[in-house]
Amino acid sequence: MPELVDKGYLYIAQPPLFKITKGKNESYIKNEKELNEFILKKSSEKKKIKVLQKDHTLVDYNLFIFYVI
């Protein structure tokens, strides 16, 4: 057995922890950090905020979530 390790023939399988399915699309996520990033990204997609400017015009902005890891 040690010769398998020394020669590099031993591999460790690391299956993903989470599987997310939406329609026919499947995503596999390997840890909780990636799951949190996925949730933040999906929850902020297609969100807009409206801002009333000084000249009383409404402007739409896409909402992006910025965070530091």
Image: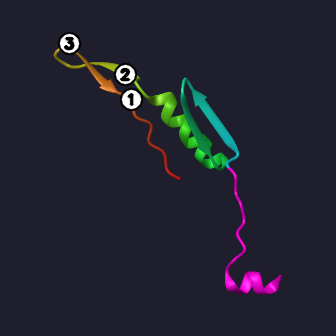
Q: Amino acid at mark 2?
A: Lys
Q: Residues within 10 Å of mark 1 (few under 14, many from 20)?
A: few
User: Residue 69 placed where, x, y %?
Assistant: 53, 53
Q: Mark 2 or mark 3: name the one nearer the start of the chain.
A: 2
User: Residue 58 placed where, x, y %?
Assistant: 24, 14
Q: Secondary structure at mark 3?
A: loop
> Label 3: which residue?
56
Which numbered disc covers residue 51?
Answer: none
Q: CA distance from mark 1 to mark 2?
A: 5 Å
Q: Amino acid at mark 3?
A: His
Contact, CB < 8 Å: mark 2 with mark 3?
no
Q: Is residue 29 above or below residue 43?
A: below
Which numbered disc covers residue 48?
Answer: 2
Q: Residues within 10 Å of mark 3 (few under 14, many from 20)?
A: few
Q: Is residue 37 left or right of residue 44?
A: right
Colour scheme in the image? rainbow
Q: CA distance from mark 2 to mark 3?
A: 18 Å
The quarter of the rendered structure image containing the N terminus is bottom right
Q: Amino acid at mark 1?
A: Leu
Q: Is residue 20 magenta?
A: no
Q: Is residue 5 magenta?
A: yes
Q: Nearer the viewer, residue 66 or 52?
A: 66
Q: Is residue 39 above or below residue 57?
A: below
Q: CA distance from mark 1 to mark 3?
A: 21 Å
The span picked out in magenta is: 1-15
User: Image point 66% across, 46% down: which residue?
Assistant: 32
Q: Secondary structure at mark 1?
A: loop
Q: Mark 1 or mark 2: name the one nearer the start of the chain.
A: 2
**Mark toward the viewer: 1 or 3:** 1
> Label 1: which residue?
63
